[in-house]
């Protein structure tokens, strides 16, 4: 029987505990001390050996979030929705989550304002954009898609960030989706039809479902990772 890698197991247990707390009480409200308290005998110094800052743990959650949302987009496309439409639906669901759930909003805003997490988001989205927008941007290089995602991530952040006196969710989304699709050379009439189509959907309900499914996905992925380490 193979020996358990105690270091890898400890690292994964930290991830499991931190991500669970982030999703239960928010990233901003979760402290390193509270994570260590949940882990019982682990000290902050011991945890910092594996993750130097709390931001490193947020990056773990952001990576899972990007993978989950990409999978969600693929599922919607396979169910008959175009990939471009799925991109629109993704941002729409994200924005509705942030409007209706404070913890979801805290996690998204924290991810978009973290340099480490933002790099993960941009890299993931640039890879996806190369596939989704290959027809309208056939001659674009990898660098051009990466540059485009710098602009797109800024638009997404502005859409998710709400303040007192902010215009309605629908108005923010309509402007954001139009700008993003324009960056990727989607013709005006097609942009208009995609935006109208996504607003005709129950995107708020989809946002709630996506949030619940993501929480379950995080639990499943962490359980799978720990099982693999224990039974390897």
Image: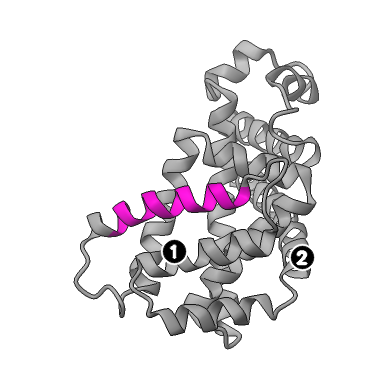
Q: Which mark is residue 180?
A: 1
Give residue 46's position: percent from left, percent from top.
Answer: 61, 15
Q: In front: mark 2 or mark 1?
A: 1
Where, by quadrant of the figure, is residue 198 drawn?
bottom right
Residue 217 left/right relative to 58: right
Magenta part of the chain? 145-160
Give residue 85's position: percent from left, percent from top.
Answer: 53, 77
| Snapshot colouring | one colour
Task: Judge whether residue 184 can be spotted in this image.
Answer: yes
Q: Residue at x 25, y 58 (%)?
A: 144
Q: In the displayed structure, would residue 26 be above or below residue 160? A: above
Density class for disc 2 (Cα within 10 Å; few <14, some 14-19, many ≥20) is few
Residue 67 among those drawn in magenta: no
Where, by quadrant of the figure, is residue 69 drawn?
bottom right
Q: CA distance from mark 2 to mark 1?
A: 24 Å
Residue 90 left/right relative to 208: left
Residue 174 left/right relative to 202: left
181 and 66: which one is in front?
Answer: 181
Q: Which mark is residue 231?
A: none
Residue 17 left/right relative to 45: right
Give residue 23's position: percent from left, percent from top.
Answer: 75, 42
Q: Residue at x 66, y 47 (%)?
A: 222
Secondary structure found at label 1: helix
Which quadrant is the N terminus positioned in?
top right
Q: Main secondary structure of the magenta part?
A: helix
Q: Residue at x 64, y 36 (%)?
A: 15
Q: Residue at x 53, y 84 (%)?
A: 193
Q: Which mark is residue 209?
A: 2
Q: In the displayed structure, would residue 128 be above or below residue 32? A: below
Give the tally of numbered discs: 2
194 and 82: which one is in front?
Answer: 194
């Amino acid at each position: 029987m193979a020996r358990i890698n105690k270091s890898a197991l400890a690292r994964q247990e930290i991830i499991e505990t931190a991500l669970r707390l982030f999703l239960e009480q928010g990233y901003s409200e979760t402290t390193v001390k509270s994570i260590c308290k949940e882990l019982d005998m682990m000290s902050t110094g011991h945890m910092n050996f594996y993750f130097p800052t709390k931001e490193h743990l947020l990056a773990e959650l952001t990576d899972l979030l990007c993978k989950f949302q990409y999978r969600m987009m693929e599922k919607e496309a396979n169910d008959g929705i175009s990939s471009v439409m799925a991109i629109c639906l993704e941002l729409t669901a994200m924005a509705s989550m942030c409007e209706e759930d404070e913890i979801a909003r805290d996690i998204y805003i924290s991810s978009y304002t973290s340099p480490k997490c933002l790099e993960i988001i941009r890299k993931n989205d640039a890879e996806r954009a190369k596939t989704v927008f290959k027809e309208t941007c056939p001659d674009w290089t990898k660098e051009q898609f990466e540059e485009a995602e710098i602009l797109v991530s800024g638009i997404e952040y502005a859409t998710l960030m709400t303040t007192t006196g902010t215009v309605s969710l629908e108005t923010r989304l309509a402007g954001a989706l139009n700008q993003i699709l324009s960056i990727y050379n989607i013709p005006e009439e097609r942009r208009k039809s995609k935006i109208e189509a996504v607003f005709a959907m129950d995107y708020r309900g989809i946002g709630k479902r996506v949030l619940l499914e993501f929480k379950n996905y995080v639990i499943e992925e962490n359980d799978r990772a720990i099982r693999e380490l224990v039974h390897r």
